[in-house]
Image (spheres, grey):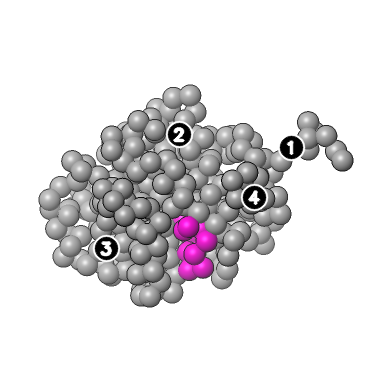
Amino acid sequence: MTSECRSWRSLSDLLCDDAQASVALIGAPLSEKSLTPGRCDLAPKVLRATLPRLSVYDVESGVDLSALRVYDRGDLNLKVMTPEAAFTPVKEAVLAEAKPGRLVVVIGGNNAITRPVAAGLDPSLKSLGLLTLDAHFDLRDVDCGLTNGNPIQALLDDGLPGPQIAQIGLAPFANTARAHQKAKDAGVHVMTARDIRKHGVALVVNDALDLLAKRCDLIMVDFDIDVIDRACLPGAPGARPGGMSAQDFFDAARLIGAHPKVAGVDLTEFDPSLDVADITALTAARWFAEVLTGFQAR
């Protein structure tokens, strides 16, 4: 048997140039028009650089990801692009990689990428369900242009029906009464950070997935990393104290990755320039491992 000094396998070993692989990875380093200016554009590069630090084996469940392959399409050139300008390149990249039975993973960038990712998975938006794990509704008005604070409002304006949206993890004192009322009026399914603590993340996530699966042919999930408690996640400018635990975030990622109707996920609002001791980078890498573990279990 070969020594593991030479053969230790990490998550980075799963990345490949096989365009037919069952998972596709796209970097979408959009940073313009963020309500909290920063360097979310660094996230795809930092995530890839962190993957060698995680093994392909989960000692708790006995899962081994060694046989899984992830086609790494690389990063889109979104430098100094506004969300409006980035819409088409992100949408077209996702559309090119979306295939039946495949999972498309998009690493932002700020949360404005969620709109074009959704459009790439279903240009009509009629068959798409959207689940967000986010501290915020992202329902700000769009009259001042697209930002990371209004992708859900933009998608509603585009024609995505409100009853085909579920939002979980909403944080207290991080949103407005108007945004909450908008969500209610649109028929959005809303569960707060307290609901997760009260009922458990598995129940909240599964209920949301079941609801969307009954109404939609495919599901996209936006993982805004600022849904996690700020104490556990320094590299997310929108994170606040009292958010979801990192473990709940990982458990949610595995459950979501395993759902047969989930066709695409994104990870947004990770700003490496704010990170401390690689805490957020390692959290993002572990999230990737959990999504892949769920997908492999399908």
Figure quadrant of residue 2: top right
Where residue 207 sits, quadrant-wise, is bottom left
Asked if residue 259 is among those painted magenta in the image, a careful observer would answer yes
Tell which circle, 1 or 2, labels the residue nearer the N-terminal end: 1
Inspect the image, locate mark 1, and give the three-letter code of the amino acid beneath it: Trp
Cα gap from disc 1 to disc 2, whole angstroms: 24 Å
Question: Circle 1 is placed at which residue position?
Answer: 8
Q: Nearer the viewer, residue 215 or 106?
A: 215
At numbered mark 3, what does the secondary structure look like: helix, strand or loop? strand
Q: Which residue is mark 2?
A: 280
Front tag of 4 and 1: 4
- Which region shows up in magenta? 255-265
Give the class, few, some or many, for how many residues have Cα within 10 Å of label 1's Cα (few <14, many ≥20): few
Q: Relative to the observer, which residue lies in front, 129 or 146?
A: 129
Of labels 4 and 2, the one closer to you: 4
Callout 4 amino acid: Gly
Q: Are marks 3 and 4 in contact (CB under 8 Å)?
A: no
Q: Which mark is residue 62?
A: 4
Which residue matches tag 3? 189
Mark 2–mark 3 Cα distance, whole angstroms, equals 28 Å
Q: CA distance from mark 3 to mark 1?
A: 44 Å
Characterize the local packing of mark 2: few (<14), some (14-19) or many (20 or more) Cα atoms within 10 angstroms.
Answer: many
